[in-house]
Image (cartoon, helix red, strand yellow):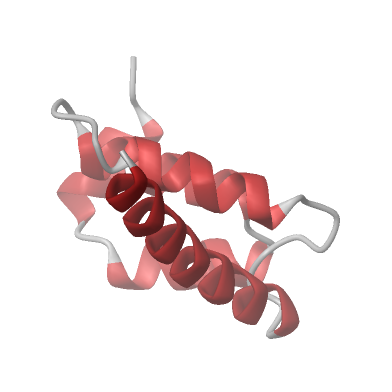
C-alpha cells in the first residue's frame, strides 16, 4: 500500500507541475485547486472505458480560450467529435 501511495503521489506531482505550467502560460484557468485536480487525473487514467474522451473533456473544462484552441489543434477530428458530442 505504501508503494502504491508513493507511486500515486509521484504521478499526481507530475500532473500538478504540468497543470501549474499550463496555468502560468495561460492555457488553464487560474482559480482552480490543481493539487486536487492532479489527483483526479490520476484516477481518471485508471478508467478502462473512454479514457481519452474523459481526460480531454476534463482538461478542456479547465482551459482558457487559448487552452481550448491548443487542445483542438492536437486532437484528431474524430476524437473532438466524440468529446463535443459525448452522451
Q: Is residue 18 left or right of residue 83?
A: right
Residue 15 in the image: above or below residue 32: below
Q: Give the quadrant of residue 10.
A: bottom left
The N terminus - image quarter = top left
Residue 37 in the image: above or below residue 74: above
Q: Position of residue 83 (x, y in %)?
A: 34, 37
Q: Position of residue 31 (x, y in %)?
A: 85, 55
Q: Residue extending furthest right?
A: 31
Residue 59 in the image: above or below residue 64: above
Q: Residue extending furthest front?
A: 2
Q: Residue at x 66, y 54 (%)?
A: 35
Q: Residue at x 68, y 56 (%)?
A: 34
Q: Nearer the viewer, residue 19 or 75?
A: 19
Q: Residue extending furthest top?
A: 87
In this figure, what is the number of numbered marks? 0
Q: Nearer the viewer, residue 3 or 56?
A: 3
Q: Give the quadrant of residue 72.
A: bottom left
Q: Residue at x 37, y 37 (%)?
A: 43
Q: Is residue 67 left or right of residue 87?
A: right
Residue 69 in the image: above or below residue 26: above
Q: Give the quadrant of residue 14.
A: bottom left
The C terminus - image quarter = top left
Q: Position of residue 54 (x, y in %)?
A: 34, 35
Amino acid at each position: 500500500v505504501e508503494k502504491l501511495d508513493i507511486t500515486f503521489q509521484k504521478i499526481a506531482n507530475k500532473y500538478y507541475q504540468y497543470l501549474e505550467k499550463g496555468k502560468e502560460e495561460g492555457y488553464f484557468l487560474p482559480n482552480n485547486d490543481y493539487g486536487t485536480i492532479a489527483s483526479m487525473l490520476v484516477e481518471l487514467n485508471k478508467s478502462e472505458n473512454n479514457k481519452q474522451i474523459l481526460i480531454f473533456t476534463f482538461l478542456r473544462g479547465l482551459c482558457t480560450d487559448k487552452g481550448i484552441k491548443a487542445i483542438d489543434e492536437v486532437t484528431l477530428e474524430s476524437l473532438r467529435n466524440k468529446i463535443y458530442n459525448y452522451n
